[in-house]
Image (cartoon, rainbow, N blue to C red):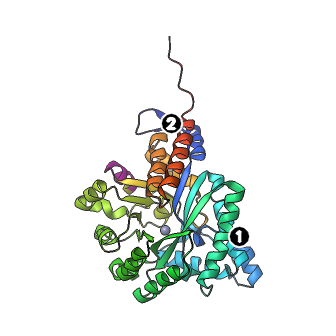
Amino acid sequence: MRTETTSGPTTTSEEIERIVTGLPKVSLHCHLLGSIQAQTVVELAAKHGVDLAGHTAETLYDHASYEDLGEFLRVLDVVGSVVRDRDDLHRVTYESLTEGGAAHRVLYREIQISPPGHGNVPYPHLIEGITAGMRDAQTDTGIDSRVVVGLCREDTPAAALELVETVIAHRTEEVIGIGLDYAEVKGPPVQFAPAYARAAEAGLQRTAHSETGPPQHIEVLLDELGCSRIDHGYHVVDDPEITARCVQERVPFICTPVSSDIGRYSGSGDGSHRRIRQMVEAGLVVAIDSDDPPMFGTDPTHDYRALAHALGFGLDQLGTFTLNAVEASWLEEADKAALRRRALEEIEALRGPEPRPQT
Ligand SMILES: [Zn+2]
């Protein structure tokens, strides 16, 4: 099969494979609880005597059948209920960063965690287990990572503020920012402004999900919550003025093609990823990640593969997604510059030798 690229020449399936597997990746939108392999969930459930209602590793993540976000979140709750102690947290973090990260050439990840999804695990224990997994993953594979703490928009604004206070009280250098996830219909963003203001005051960076919400919510995230980037944000293209503003201000959007398509949250759900195409064509700063990879039958490489096949993107555009993620990351400037250099080198190496001029 040959696919037209936006940059001119045709790209074969083999060439797409070479590019997407070799491409350096920077991961800003991947949830820890959503990145646990089904086999690990089954083993942890056995360890803690949790009944998985007859599910096996083969049936637990039935990604074709998440009819709505509620159904997906119910499975996520089951996953959260089996990750209990420091060893569990170390294991799931380590596996997510190695097999689910470095093995796909992810150089750096800002892991999104959801403390409310972990039930009764106290926040300091959560961070201790996760950071131990992060350190070992870096030692063994070189992958660098930080933590983004997700506030649950189904909780009250007071509970969200309390979580921010907890993060500040137990501050570690790995935790660099906050996000906002779970069901958007239950938690319009403006009510979380006090929690976000407190995070800003403490020097924490801010992002939030806007997957199903109207484009006006994106302005709320920028203006009321002080977000420096947006998770998903597909509906921005429904409003030309807000789109123009986001282009002008170079607001990064971290899109997750496969999960948003399967969940039909992006408004397409037909494999066309048309909103991502519209966002790129509008000149928005777009980066790509895989959200909850095994739960949606994807991985960090496959989201790039899906876009390359559906939209004909070649190395130039796919490499731009990685470089956009570098810019959107919350690393210190020196670390960001080093990551940018490495990503550029690896992207250039994928171009291969220039063809000899014909004489
Ligand atoms: Zn997400």
Residue in the picture at 49% in, 75% down: 150
Which residue does the numbered mark 2 point to in the structure image? 11
Query: Is 161 displayed left or right of 58 in the figure?
Result: left
Specify whether residue 76 is in view: yes
Q: Is residue 277 magenta?
A: yes
Which residue is outermost to the top?
Answer: 359
Label 2: which secondary element:
strand
Foreground label between 1 and 2: 1
**Whether the residue under disc 2 has CB within 8 Å of ligand 1:** no
Which residue is outermost to the right?
Answer: 47
Task: Tell me if residue 271 comes above or below residue 357 in the rendering.
Answer: below
Which residue does the numbered mark 1 point to in the structure image? 91
Q: Is residue 47 magenta?
A: no
> Where are the magenta residues, as a range?
276-283
Amino acid type, residue under disc 2 in the picture: Thr
Label 2 CA crowd tier, 10 Å (few <14, some 14–19, many 20+) = many
Task: Tell me if residue 318 comes above or below residue 217 in the rendering.
Answer: above
Specify whether residue 297 is in view: no
Q: Main SS of the magenta segment?
A: helix
Label 1: which secondary element:
helix
Quarter residue 62 falls in: bottom right
Residue in the picture at 59% in, 38% down: 14
Query: Is 74 displayed left or right of 238 in the figure?
Result: right
Percent across and percent down for residue 335 are 53, 54
Label 1 CA crowd tier, 10 Å (few <14, some 14–19, many 20+) = many
Percent across and percent down for residue 58 are 69, 68
343 or 197: which is nearer to us?
A: 197
Quarter residue 297 falls in: bottom right
